[in-house]
Image: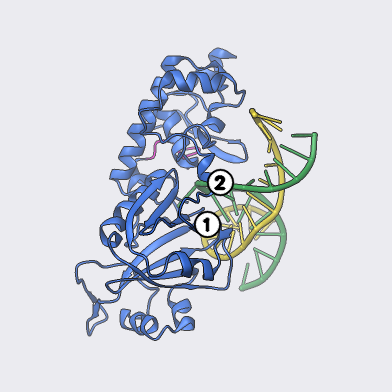
Chain colours: A blue, B yellow, C green
Amino acid sequence: MPELPEVEVIRQGLAPRLVGRRFLAVHKGEKKLRRESSLLRLQRLVVGRRLTALKRRGKYLLFQLEGGATLVIHLGMTGRLLLWRATLVPLADGQVEDSGHKGCEPSPPFSLRAVEMAAAADDVELHKFLFPHVHLRFQVEGDFWLLYQDVRRFGQVLACAPGEVPEALGRMGREPFSRRVKPEWLLEMGRRRKCPLKNFLLDGRTITGIGNIYASEIMFAAQLSPTLPVSRLTLRDWQRIIMATRRILRLAIRRGGTTVNDYLNCEGKAGLFQFELMVYGRAGEPCKKCGALIERLVQAGRSTFYCPWCQKNQAIND
DNA sequence: CACCCCACCTGCGTGC
DNA sequence: TGCACGCAGGTGGGGT
């Protein structure tokens, strides 16, 4: 689900509300995530600690805790981090009075009062009913609950001891906004590879954070064909890719991310960038620039969307 | 090492 | 209406 912009939007939403606060408790459901720490480990390393900073690396969120431990969360395809504050006051007609921060809505028709009671009484069954697919609940100082919800359970929640870093973070490429991402460097990285541009952008070992939606959008913005072998890209092509990447990701963050199917921010709200997508998910529809029909192809097992006219430089090379 | 394919899951839309 | 199938934002392990 979430790519760099969505993860960043969640980080920006959570940070001001959680940094400085202490984790008071953690509860775990019985279904396992792709990778997760044991309840015991989470309790030992996270519970009782104050959050000193909330950082992002690629699509990973890093909850840095006092004492040096880190809670690492990856949302996989359908992961959500929802912040819910237990101080909402339900009104007589079922509406909810906004007490500053609204938090995520429980599934209707249950009232927030019921949720509050479920949390207060630690009623697991009721909570499961109100928030399906919530696999972890962190209680935070100040009546906050941080819920980890994940329908497909491809996500990761790892408690790391001080100095410990998940292997995946070590293998990760550079941040798209890093000054170390330069055309010369990408030219060098691309020269050794034979894969098409799309696969290169998706493979986070060079530049991290670009997923399937933004890869297509970036290649459209840079006017480059997804099938171009990276070894053939010029310095100018790489420059265009860098500019396009930063422009698209920055705009997507400003729009609160892309909600194609079920992405929601920490308040349970959808993003808006889906209305500005130029190619992703638009196979058969006219290109917003030239009117040619957007095409879909499969690369590395994933859909790629592109405009055969605006991005036809592949044909020249063939 | 580079690359491909699949596995990991659930849910939803489509077409028969 | 029911069922089978394809497809969905990501990673990572195994094979070639």
Within 10 angstroms of label 1, few (less than 14), some, or many (20 or more) residues? Answer: many
Q: Position of residue A217 (x, y in %)?
A: 42, 35
Query: Which corner quadrant holds the C terminus of chain A?
Result: top right
Q: Nearer the viewer, mark 2 or mark 1?
A: 2
> Residue flagged by tag 2: what amino acid is it?
Glu
Q: Position of residue A52 (x, y in %)?
A: 31, 56
Q: Which residue is disc 1 drawn over?
A: A155
Residue A40 visible here: yes
A21 relative position to A244: left or right: left
Image height of C1 relative to A58, above or below: below
Image height of A197 relative to A4, above or below: above
Which residue lies at the image location 54% right of the left edge and 30% below the top edge?
A: A200
Which residue lies at the image location 46% right of the left edge and 64% below the top edge?
A: A45
Q: Position of residue A196 (x, y in %)?
A: 58, 26
Secondary element type, mark 1:
loop
Range of magenta residues: A277-284
> Residue flagged by tag 1: what amino acid is it?
Gly
Label placed on residue A167: 2
Image height of A259 relative to A96, above or below: above
Which residue lies at the image location 42% right of the left edge and 83% below the top edge?
A: A122
- Pinpoint the chain carrying mark 2: A
